[in-house]
Image: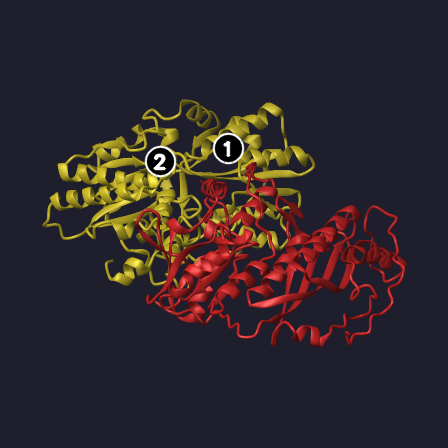
Chain colours: A red, B yellow
């Protein structure tokens, strides 16, 4: 029996208006109604429902998953809030679940803080909360505590969400950016740049249409399968902002090795390639929300690929390069054309070229 | 991808490199310096670095990355003018993305935006015109920038604004023209160029005829080339064959896109809307006669320079910058004493570090391999 005392749930309030006002952040009945109607009812779990100032977690239950606690936090801002393949709510769950999973942790609990702009449609808020709840349920994590603030119009862009997650790292798993060794194989679990391209297209200000959908997904299931097949995985990281170029540079710098990738082996969807060609963008720097960069010992590469490909989110997994004895910290790419170029860290954000 | 992958074929590239190497061997072996080929266009520079072409070529060939990035050659005073217009409360200032970061003497457009100016990134001048329709109570200014490639689209936008009777749309015209610029480079006393890759997109509008003087009066070959890596290698091979044969002609490698006579409709729109300025200032190169255009009197009401008071002050390039020498191929980017230290893509001092198409920025981001090998 759990040592945690389950507190009795109370009756949930209901919102009667279509737009969020400053009154919903005032701490009174309006705020209680907003939290109950939008968040508590969607997230629906015993740990959250009593709405104490903290969630009370069972230590023995945590310890059953491994021997170290992992904790992470991330803020989510995106324009537009709803885009092909996802929305800010799904992003806020998947991103934090993935940040735990790439450390080898089993993600278990999340907290969620939302900053809402006065005037936001309650229906949009409900849709975002529903999406968070569905994503969390599918990922088998619970949103157990949270915070809601309403700020005056113009003080934020519709909604900002911060999620904090805790998980437990499996015994024996040691993953780190400083662990890559010369000869290691670098893998990715699928096509790159989909999220960045989908968001840029969804903004609709460049009159470009693309069939690309965001790859936003919770990857802990696939990562668990990978770690079960290859417990000695050296490095895992989700390639979000800055794309795989940034992750590879971080790996090369921390491990003091060179990394060489092969453009021909780097999987990029036709739609993303075309999009990048038109705007002069480099897909290696586009954001992903469902892709990880993996480094494994050469003898583990086949097993890792097989484990990834057996999972729906790793169907297109492939090896893209190798860790080499070149200049430490340097990432290079053998181009599709037979040349070689440096893949450096991006300075600022990528801006479309004039012509 | 159709019409792209065909021009990135590795086997064809290797065959072309063999051909290029063979031609280079047939060119006077007693030369004391490399064969210097200038690609005029920033798009070429970008492709050369992106595909690692420099490292594939025989060491006897040096590619000189010329003045073809309009963002890079924009003088600091003009950026100050942009900022002055953008900071007016009634103005929505619209610009292509890569012009946002160009430093003025005080700040860039990106910094002005952070401080409250209404600066918006657009992808076409027509997007700016659409903003003018949506915001009739604001003044929408489009930062018109670029060579002959982008000139027709801004000219057509002005004609469209005129046809619709839109009164709150203006251009801040900074269009520049390529031919006087090449001439200025050819007139440079320290010229060491053996041939040119001509700009594909510009030539799509102008045709190939405007380059004839380069072959006739300066005795240098020019090959108009496309932007795919095979196009560029093919163009280099064509230039080398001319050098080997002692010819100096204008040839068209990019005939699938570039008609020799150019695009008559685009040229007509350009001729109708713009007239040559007496001179225009370039970053790194100074003032070049007849190298820029402005709106004709008939379109004065669409001219931001007439609508708004702007500083219009000439600001000298930082004295430490050697952009001019790099542009003319006298020194390589990394031989500039500021390269990679005070001047880097995050805080560019010089013109060529500003846009990813600039020679210095491209070297900073993509280059370096040759230098590590000790080839250059």
Q: Nearer the viewer, mark 1 or mark 2?
A: 2
| Chain name for mark 2 | B
> Which of the marked residues, 1 or 2, is nearer the chain's N terminus?
1
Tag 1, which secondary structure? helix
Q: Residue B34 in the image: x percent, y percent?
A: 19, 51
- Picture residue at 64% right of the left edge, 54% below the top: A91
User: Looking at the rendered structure, which numbered label has been put on residue B66?
Assistant: none
Q: In terms of depth relative to the viewer, which is nearer, A243 or A12?
A: A12
Q: Residue B80 in the image: x percent, y percent?
A: 52, 50
Q: Quadrant of the C terminus of chain B?
A: bottom left
User: Looking at the rendered structure, which numbered label has been put on residue B154?
Assistant: 1
Q: Quadrant of residue B304 in the image?
A: top right
Marks 2 and 1: in contact by CB < 8 Å? no
User: Looking at the rendered structure, which numbered label has been put on residue B200?
Assistant: 2
Q: Neighbour class for label 2 at 10 Å: few (<14), some, many (≥20)? A: many
Q: In terms of depth relative to the viewer, which is nearer, A89 or B202?
A: A89
Q: Residue A261 in the image: x percent, y percent?
A: 38, 56
- Picture residue at 13% right of the left edge, 50% below the top: B31
Q: Is residue B77 above or below residue B263?
A: below
Q: Quadrant of the N terminus of chain B?
A: top left
| Chain name for mark 1 | B
């Amino acid at each position: 029996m759990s040592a945690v005392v389950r507190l009795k749930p109370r009756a949930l309030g209901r919102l009667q208006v279509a737009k969020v006002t400053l009154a919903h952040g005032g701490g009174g009945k309006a705020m209680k109604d907003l939290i109950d109607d939008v968040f508590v009812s969607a997230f629906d779990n015993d740990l959250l429902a009593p709405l104490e100032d903290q969630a009370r977690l069972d230590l023995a239950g945590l310890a059953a998953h491994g021997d170290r606690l992992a904790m992470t936090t991330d803020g989510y801002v995106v324009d537009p809030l709803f885009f092909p393949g996802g929305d800010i709510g799904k992003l806020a769950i998947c991103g934090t679940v993935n940040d735990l999973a790439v450390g080898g942790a089993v993600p278990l609990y999340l907290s969620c803080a939302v900053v809402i702009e006065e005037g936001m449609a309650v229906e949009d808020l409900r849709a975002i909360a529903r999406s968070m709840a569905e994503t969390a349920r599918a990922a088998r994590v619970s949103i157990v505590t949270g915070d809601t603030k309403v700020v005056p119009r113009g003080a934020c862009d519709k909604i900002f969400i911060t999620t904090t997650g805790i998980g437990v790292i499996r015994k024996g798993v040691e993953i780190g950016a400083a662990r890559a060794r010369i000869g290691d194989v670098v893998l990715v679990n699928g096509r790159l740049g989909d999220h960045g391209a989908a968001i840029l297209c969804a903004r609709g200000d460049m009159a470009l249409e693309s069939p690309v959908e965001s790859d936003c997904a919770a990857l802990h299931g696939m990562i668990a399968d990978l770690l079960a097949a290859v417990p000695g995985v050296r490095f895992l990281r989700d390639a979000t902002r800055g794309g795989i170029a940034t992750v590879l540079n971080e790996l090369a710098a921390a491990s003091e090795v060179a990394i060489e990738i092969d453009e021909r082996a780097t999987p990029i969807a036709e739609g993303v390639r075309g999009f990048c060609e038109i705007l002069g963008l480099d897909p290696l720097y586009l954001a992903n929300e469902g892709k990880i960069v993996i480094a494994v010992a050469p003898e583990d590469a086949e097993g890792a690929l097989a484990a990834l490909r057996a999972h729906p989110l790793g169907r297109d997994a492939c090896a893209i390069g190798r860790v080499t004895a070149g200049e430490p910290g340097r990432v290079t790419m053998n181009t599709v054309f037979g040349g070689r170029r440096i893949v450096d860290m991006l300075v600022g954000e990528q801006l479309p070229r004039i012509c | 991808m159709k019409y792209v992958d065909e021009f990135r074929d590795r086997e064809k590239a290797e065959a072309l490199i063999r051909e290029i190497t063979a031609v280079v061997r047939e060119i006077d072996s007693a030369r004391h310096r490399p064969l210097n080929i200038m690609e005029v266009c920033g798009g070429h520079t970008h492709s050369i670095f992106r595909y690692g072409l420099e490292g594939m070529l025989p060491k006897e060939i040096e590619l000189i990355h010329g003045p073809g990035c309009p963002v890079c050659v924009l003088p600091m005073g003009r950026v100050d003018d942009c900022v002055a217009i953008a900071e007016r409360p009634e103005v929505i200032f619209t610009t292509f993305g890569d012009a946002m970061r160009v430093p003025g003497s005080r700040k860039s457009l990106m910094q002005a935006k952070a401080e409250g100016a209404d600066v918006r990134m657009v992808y076409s001048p027509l997007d700016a015109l659409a903003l003018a329709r949506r915001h009739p109570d604001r003044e929408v200014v489009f930062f018109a920038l670029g060579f002959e490639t982008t000139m027709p689209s801004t000219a057509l936008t002005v004609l469209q604004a005129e046809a619709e009777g839109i009164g709150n749309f203006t251009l801040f015209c900074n269009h520049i023209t390529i031919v006087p610029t090449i001439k200025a480079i050819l007139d440079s006393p320290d010229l060491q160029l053996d041939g040119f890759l001509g700009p594909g997109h510009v030539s799509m509008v102008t045709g190939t005829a405007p380059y004839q003087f380069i072959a006739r009066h300066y005795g240098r070959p020019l090959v108009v080339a496309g932007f795919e890596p095979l196009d560029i290698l093919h163009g280099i091979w064509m230039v080398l064959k001319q050098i080997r044969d002692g010819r100096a002609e204008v040839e068209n490698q990019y005939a699938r896109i570039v008609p020799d006579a150019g695009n008559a409709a685009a040229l007509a729109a350009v001729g109708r809307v713009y007239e040559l300025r007496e001179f225009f200032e370039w970053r790194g190169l100074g003032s070049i006669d007849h190298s820029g255009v402005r709106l004709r009197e008939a379109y004065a009401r669409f001219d931001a320079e007439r609508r708004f008071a702007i500083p219009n002050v000439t600001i000298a390039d930082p004295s430490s910058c050697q952009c001019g020498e790099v542009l003319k191929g006298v020194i390589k980017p990394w031989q500039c004493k500021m390269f990679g230290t005070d001047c880097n893509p995050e805080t560019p001092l010089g013109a060529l570090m500003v846009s990813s198409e600039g020679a210095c920025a491209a070297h900073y981001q993509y280059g370096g391999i040759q230098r590590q090998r000790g080839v250059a």
